Amino acid sequence: MTVETLTETSSRGSPMCLKSRLAALRSRAESDLPHGAFDRLQAEAAQLRASGTLRQALKAGDTAPDFRLRDGQGAMVRLGALLQAGPVVICFYRGDWCQFCTLELEAWTRVSGEVTALGASLVGIAPQASNLRHQCGTASTPFPLLADLDAKVAKSFGVAFMPADELHGEYRALGRPCGADYHTPLPVPATYVVDPSGQIVFSYLDSDFTNRIEPAEILIALRRLQSMRPAAAVSNPPPFRRRT
C-alpha cells in the first residue's frame, strides 16, 4: 500500500486522534458482530492485499483522471474545476453505513477549515446514492460528498474491489443496507492529494477497512505542497509517498 512517510507529527496518540477512535471501534466490532464475521472480513482484506490487485492503483507521480459526480444537493462537481482553485484532497470511503467511514468523515470535518486555509479543497467519494445519507441519519459535512454510483471513479483510480458473494451477510451485519446493490464494487480506504496540474503528489490506500490515514498527515503534505508552490511555475514538485 502506498503512502508518504512524513517526519512531522501532530496529534498522533491523542485520545481524539482518528487512529485511536478507529482502534476502539475495531474492538467493539470484533465483539459485537456475529461470531466469526469480523475475522472473515479481515481475511477478505488480507486476500485482497496478497492478490496484488491494489498494486495497479494510481499512486504519487501518476495523473489523476478527471471526473464529474453529483453532490448531495444534485450539483455536478468536476475535479478539473476544483483544481483551478488549488490542490484537491480526495477521500474514497465505502458509504455512510460504514461506522469506520463515519469516524473518518468526522475527522475530516474537524480539519476541513485547515484544509481550506492551505488553499486546498476536499471531497469524499462513495458508491452510494445521496439519499442514503438521510436513511443512515448521517450528519452533513462542510465539504462535498459525491455519489460514485457504479464505482466508476473508484475503478479509474484502481481502488475498487468486489466483495465476495459469500460475505453479504457479514457486510449486512457491519451495516451495509439490505437494499444496497451488492454487485457494485466498494473502494478500499484511499486518500489522494492532487496538485493543480492534475498530478497525484500524495497517495494512501489500505485493503483493511478498519484503517485510515490520520488527516493531520494530509495537512503536513498540503503544507509541504504550499511551500513548494513558488517553484511550481518552473517545475512540478516531486511526488512523495509513504509505505505501510
Image: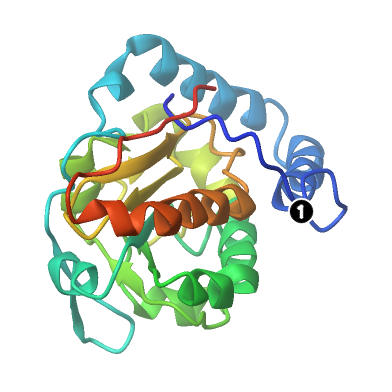
The answer to whether residue 222 of the structure is visible from this angle is: yes
Circle 1: residue type: Cys
Residue bearing mark 1: 17
Residue at (78, 52) in percent of width and height: 11
Residue 106 x %, y %? 63, 68
Q: State the quadrant of the N terminus.
A: top left
Q: Decide: is 94 above or below 73.
A: above
Q: State the quadrant of the C terminus.
A: top right
Would residue 176 appear left or right of 114 to someone viewing this image?
left
Residue 184 x %, y %? 25, 48
Would residue 177 appear left or right of 23 to someone viewing this image?
left
Residue at (31, 47) in percent of width and height: 182
Relative depth, front residue between 182 and 73: 73
Would residue 68 appear left or right of 28 to someone viewing this image?
left
Element type where label 1 sits in the image: loop
Q: How is the rendered protein coloured?
A: rainbow
The answer to whether residue 185 of the structure is visible from this angle is: no
